[in-house]
Image (tube, rainbow, N blue to C red):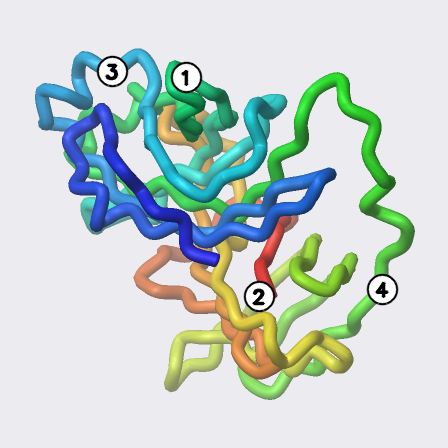
Amino acid sequence: MRLQVLSTNFGVDPADVQLDVYQNNDVTVINGDFVVDTTNEDYKMAFALEIAVSGLNCPKSMNTTVFVMNANGGTHDITITKASIKTKENNQRIICVRPVRAYDSLGMYRVVFRSMFAQPNVAFTPQFQGFDSITPEVIAGAMTGAELYLHSQSNWLMLVMKVTSLTFDASQNHVQATLPGFPSSANTNFPLIFTEELWSETGSKYYPAFIENGVLTILKDGNGEETNSPVKFARAFILR
């Protein structure tokens, strides 16, 4: 279900905020993204990025995380920031995202939801009662130390992935692998994150990763050669 975005307090047109949701009495899973213009005066004044929406049932949530990525070209910088749901006057649901001021100098950054929200102080049905292990079968390039675990519900998935090394196909600059048993209906994209042993205020780096019809594609996408990066990691909640 697509949430209706009514307004924002940081200068982004509501039509440019695309958020899809699955919700039940226990959890709320949101997928989507939007781009923040850090030169906008409304953004500069915002303590929290507030998105007023219609169609969200959860009145209040604990903090969760969303991805924040450089959207101004160049390096594939990525970090996380906290997000939550709250209710304001007139029972208005608000999704709140903490701004990443370390990214202000970039001019633009993208906020990406592959996130689950849960209410505080509410007893709910346990959601994670087992994971399936999937062994990627490489068809282009190479990867070592690949581990992929999947928790599957009827309307959403939780994906956890770790890779030790990637060798990108020389002609396409990608690594591809089939994922036996991965639900064909769950097409998605997510960042595969790696951290080099060099401190940076903009956080880590990432490779764009896509799953379509059970095929995983990891793009080099202009990233330079890694140095001192022992592992690449991803975790995402994915709508089906």
Residue occupying the far front of the picture: 90
**Helix, strand or loop at disc 1?**
strand
Circles 1, 4 touching at the beta carbon (< 8 Å): no
List x then y, in percent, for residue 125.
85, 40
Between label 4 and label 3, give the one nearer the viewer.
3
- Disc 2 secondary structure class: strand
C-alpha span from label 3 to label 2: 40 Å
Would you call the spot at circle 3 few (<14 residues within 10 Å), some (14-19), or many (20 or more)? some
Q: Residue 88, labelled with which disc?
A: 1
User: Image check: 44 left or right of 63?
Assistant: left
C-beta proximity under 8 Å, tags 4 and 3? no
The residue labelled by disc 3 is 46
Q: Position of residue 210 (x, y in %)?
A: 49, 69
Which mark is drawn over residue 212?
none
Residue type at numbered disc 2: Leu
Q: Earlier in the sequence, mark 3 or mark 2?
A: 3
State the residue position of label 4.
132
Residue found at x 81% / y 45%: 127
Residue at figure coordinates x 42%, y 30% from the top left: 95
Residue that sits furthest to the right in the current view: 129
Q: CA distance from mark 2 to mark 4?
A: 23 Å
